[in-house]
Amino acid sequence: MSTDKNRATAAAILPLVGGPDNITSIAHCMTRLRISLRDRSLVQDEALRALPAVLGVVEDLGAPPSGSRGMYQIVLGPGTVARVTPEFEALVEEARSAFPAAPAAPATPSAPAAPAVPASTPATAHTITAEDLAAQGAALKEAQKARNATPFKLFLRRIANIFVPLIPALIGCGIIAGLNGLLTNLGWVPAVVPALAAIASGFMSLIAVFVGYHTAKEFGGTPILGGAVAAIIVFPGVAKIDAFGLEFKPGQGGVLGALAAALLAVYVEKWCRRWVPEALDVLVTPTLTVLISGLVTIFGLMYLAGEASAAIGTFANALLAGGGAFAGLVLGGLFLPLVMLGLHQALIPIHTTLIEQDGYTVLLPILAMAGAGQVGAAIAVYYRLPRNGSLRATIKSALPAGFLGVGEPLIYGVSLPLGRPFVTACIGGAAGGAFVGLFHQLGVAFGSTAIGPSGWALFPLLDGRSSAGITLAIYAGGLLVGYLAGFVATYFFGFTRRMLADLNTDPGPAPGTTTAAEAPPQERIPA
């Protein structure tokens, strides 16, 4: 995608989210542009979904209600989001510089969303289209939001926000680590191998510092102080410390220790800001923050976090070594609901901890099977509804992203509002997870050297105890099982007779309307 096209996409998005003054922060993950809003009611959801580059929109299910602050996520897909986000940030800054006092422009009221149409209602002259299902999916998200704005789930979301900015570096270093392993096994260009090892390992050796920095930033502290306290964990000199007869190792506690240390630093800093006189604040507050948090980190948090990290690694490996197919079935079957709720990113600290310990996370390839089940289910819906041109157009446009592990368009635009296909998609994920889990139990353990990608995009990041060929074959077999199980379960059990009667129709346009086939492409972009 050219720079001009990226900028055009950003320019089209900006007014639809309420303009530059409605935005308080901008970030992105693997697939989504994530923005914090002052006023949610200024966002034009349907107009955003209609943009050609937008695959869907996802509102944080734990966000505040409409009309107040909240996190809004626009699904652009891998690669695209990393190019559009800088252009979007530049446009926001340019607009603020040109009009520093301009208020956010009110959004033009859009047409009311189509009412949710339950699949069990009698067929009428109106065809149940992709737009109807998108409206029903939006209603389901609103209902979930009310049930998910709990303090615990909001806390998990904030933890996820700490790690999301680290994902690009994890992916890049993970792929380089895989390339380095391949060159080592083949005996090629041995002079380059040490350099690649340094490039791949440098970030991971200092990841605690980055985690500390972003933890303090997320929880309202001074980011550099959070990074300074977390740096203690990776400092080689901690090996010389003698505390209660315990031996310390650089990196002990890993990202969990860094997170806890930086979080403590935030609370110490806030306490100092309240009690330290302003004349002494610049000297006393940072000193006390680093000193108190550092001592607690060395003589408490490093040991506790180290034990917790070791326990996570032991449990994950034992779970798959002993549970095998059953553990994979449960993990693969339950992951899709977590994605639906946006809670899957709460697993990022666990994945990162496993990568620190073993070089890869054994959980991610199994959890990726949920996306395979979703793809298989969507293909079955496509073939079961040959007369519903609108829904079939949505599926065709969303499937490429689904194969690459971007499941939101298929979840919110197809399977979730239909109901039964969402359940059968979970069955497909469970079958693929069971397949991969079985091989773990048989001793062929493998995982991903980084987090973020899924589906076919995960192939370059796979590593394990066996040869690369065996590892790739097992993962590909798991995807195939997930596709087939999701397809079969949905084709035969994903619809009732009434659902087929309601959905598999195309009576033609009502007076004054346009059919899906006649509509311009931007009107058929999936929700």
Image (cartoon, helix red, strand yellow):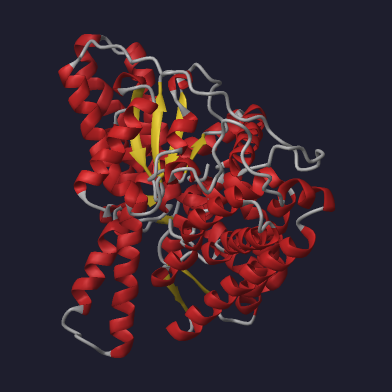
In the drawing, does residue 66 fall left or right of residue 72?
right
Please report the residue visible at 58 percent of the width from the left and 48 percent of the height from the top.
Answer: 390
In the drawing, does residue 235 fall left or right of residue 421?
left
Looking at this view, is 406 or 257 the one in front?
Answer: 406
In the drawing, does residue 390 fall left or right of residue 419?
left
Is residue 502 in sight in this rendering? yes
Choose top left, top right, bottom left or bottom right for residue 380: bottom right
**Where residue 3 sits in the image (x, y, percent)?**
20, 47
**Where residue 44 sits in the image (x, y, percent)?**
45, 26
Is residue 406 in sight in this rendering? no
Vertical relation: 386 (above or below) 304 = below
Please report the residue visible at 58 percent of the width from the left and 65 percent of the height from the top.
Answer: 366
**Where residue 57 sits in the image (x, y, percent)?**
48, 38
Vertical relation: 359 (above or below) 9 = below
Numbered-mark total: 0
Looking at this view, is 106 or 305 the one in front?
Answer: 106
Vertical relation: 403 (above or below) 506 = below
- Residue at the far bottom: name it: 187
Choose top left, top right, bottom left or bottom right for residue 230: top left
Please report the residue visible at 34 percent of the width from the left and 29 percent of the height from the top.
Answer: 25
Vertical relation: 210 (above or below) 201 = above
Looking at this view, is 320 or 90 the one in front?
Answer: 90
Looking at this view, is 416 or 473 the one in front?
Answer: 416
